[in-house]
Image (cartoon, helix red, strand yellow):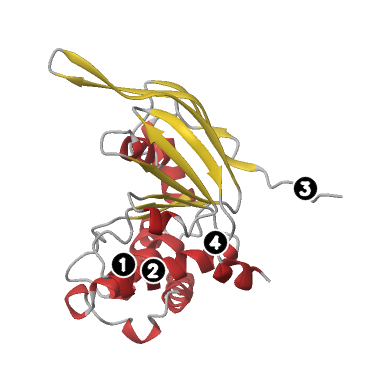
Amino acid sequence: MSGVQPASIIELSDVTKVHESGDLLVAALGGVSFAVREGEFVAIMGASGSGKTTLLGILGLLDRPTSGSYRLVDTEVATLDETRRARIRGERIGFVFQAYNLIPRATAFKNVELPLVYSRVPARERRTRVLEALGEVGLSDRVGHVPTQLSGGQQQRVAIARALVVRPSVLLADEPTGNLDSRSADDVLSILERVNAQGATIVMVTHSNEVAAHASRIVRLADGLVEADEALERSPLALEVAR
């Protein structure tokens, strides 16, 4: 008997996004529908202009669709007011960006702590969670270092720790290896695989087939529509950690 399928944590139904460009209306998304189940690692791929960045912005509640439905953890979020969207974004979504987006003069500890400060988590709990998150990405010995004292790969690992510290329902990664050398990229992808194998749900935008191969599923966009949706075999690392 097959096991019970995990519940869908993301459900998009006929999502469109139209941008105004002068007197023109440009359709970035033309009716996207797909679901992401809890614990999946999904790579979003597509050529420049395919709509993948727009889609990630909608998934992260940084933008809202022109029409269609977006349910996140069984809550319809497409039509919520900005206050509720901001609260859900802070509590349920972790972000990892290509450019790291760290505060230059803040230590690794302070950068990771920041979302917990915004959420008014008590100081003692903040410290525990920050140290756990930095340990998860292998930076327990870099707690007091500022970004200029860290390599690009280490800065991206700080950014991952900052995303994980809020214990998000979904981790969104936008070209997380785009600024990294191959060794640092492998380190970051290994971390993402490990946290996914431990139960985290990840949606990652990438242009690289090699990077996308670390996911368990690839959704390909073309001209604002889902062109293909294919499952991949889990990587050896993910399978080993999952045991």
- The secondary structure type at the circle numbered 1 is helix
Disc 3 marks which residue?
4
Task: Decide: is 189 above or below 127.
Answer: above
Q: Amino acid at mark 4?
A: Asn
- Tell me the tag on residue 156: 1
In which image quadrant can residue 120 be found?
A: bottom left
Q: Give residue 196's mark.
A: 4
- Left or right position of 52 against 237: left
Q: Is residue 176 above or below residue 23?
A: below
Q: Please indicate, yes or no, whether residue 188 appears anywhere in the rendered image.
A: yes
Q: Is residue 11 visible?
A: no
For label 4, count other residues whose C-alpha is less than 10 Å away and answer few (under 14), some (14-19) or many (20+): many
Q: Quadrant of the C terminus?
A: bottom right
SS label for mark 2? helix
Give the numbered dot on residue 188: 2
Element at badge 3?
Answer: loop
Identify residue type, mark 3: Val
- Alpha carbons under labels 4 and 2: distance apart: 12 Å
Q: Kindly report the distance in space between the C-alpha atoms of the residues bearing marks 4 and 1.
A: 17 Å
Residue at 23% across / 58% down in the picture? 99
Q: Amino acid at mark 1?
A: Gln
Badge 3: residue crowd in 10 Å (few <14, some 14–19, many ≥20) = few
Q: Gap in Å between the C-alphas at discs 3 and 2? A: 31 Å
Mark closest to the chain's N terminus, 3 or 2: 3
Three-letter code for the amino acid on which mark 2 is drawn: Val
Measured from the top left, where is residue 49 in percent x and y? Answer: 26, 34
Number of residues whose C-alpha sits closer than 10 Å to that of mark 1, classed few (under 14), some (14–19) or many (20 or more): many
Taking depth in this image into account, of 65 and 116 the one nearest to the observer is: 65
For marks 4 and 3, the one nearer the N-term is 3
Q: Residues within 10 Å of mark 2 (few under 14, many from 20)?
A: many
